[in-house]
Amino acid sequence: MDDYDFWEDVGLTCGGYNSDIDEDLINVFIQTSINNWYSEIAKTLGLDEKYVIILLEILCAADFCEYGTSPRGAWAIQDTFESNLKKLTVWYEHKWNEEFKAKKL
């Protein structure tokens, strides 16, 4: 796991310079297992809708989620949700040297 980097894995080598963005990414991913609508995810997490859409598109590009086109929404791929969540939280904790804490709702 020491060599895993989510941003490099999806081909975005310019990502990952801010722990808040990484934290938001994981919180949005958690929400995709509960709620499929980007607007509801944004409202629940207190994030801008456009920001949530971008994070969802990135999660879909990484094959962590599937994306619907009408209406717009994303959902976690259930078969891999738990393992991907573990991968993200371990990566976050290793990279930022702090425990990941899911946003309390």
Image: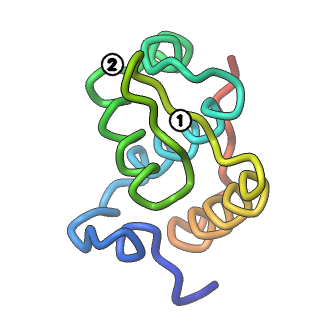
- At mark 2, the secondary structure is helix
In this rendering, position of residue 43 left or right of residue 49: right
Find the distance from the CA under tag 1 to the CA under tag 2. Answer: 11 Å
Numbered disc total: 2
Q: In which quarter of the image is the N terminus?
A: bottom right
Quadrant in the picture for residue 36: top right
Question: What residue is drawn where x is 51% and y is 33%?
Answer: 74
For label 1, the crowd category at 10 Å Cα-Cα, with few meaning under 14, some 14 to 19 and many 20 or more, is many
Q: Where is residue 75 in the image (x, y as percent from the top left)?
A: 59, 35
Report the residue at 44% width, 49% height from top.
Answer: 60
Query: Residue 17 falls in which quadrant of the image?
Result: bottom left
Q: Earlier in the sequence, mark 1 or mark 2?
A: 1
Q: Which of 72 and 82 is in front in this view?
A: 72
Give the numbered dot on residue 103. Answer: none
**Residue 67 spot, x, y in % from top left:** 46, 38
Q: Which residue is drawn at 34% across and 63% down?
A: 16
Residue 9 vertical placement versus 51 (above, below): below
Question: Amino acid type of disc 2?
Answer: Glu
Q: Quadrant of the C terminus?
A: top right
Q: Name the residue under label 2.
A: 49
Q: Which colour scheme is used?
A: rainbow
**Of the numbered discs in the image, which one, if any, rests on residue 28?**
1
Q: Can you give x and y, in whole percent of width and height, for residue 99 in the image? A: 68, 56
Whole-percent x, y for residue 19 in the image:
43, 53
Where is 95 relative to 26, above or below?
A: below
The amino acid pointed to by label 1 is Val
- Horizontal relation, residue 18 to residue 63: left or right: left
Disc 1 secondary structure class: helix
Q: Which residue lies furthest to the left in this view?
A: 14
- Judging depth in this view, the residue of 13 and 64 nearest the camera is 64
Residue found at x 68% / y 43%:
101
Give the residue furthest to the front: 70
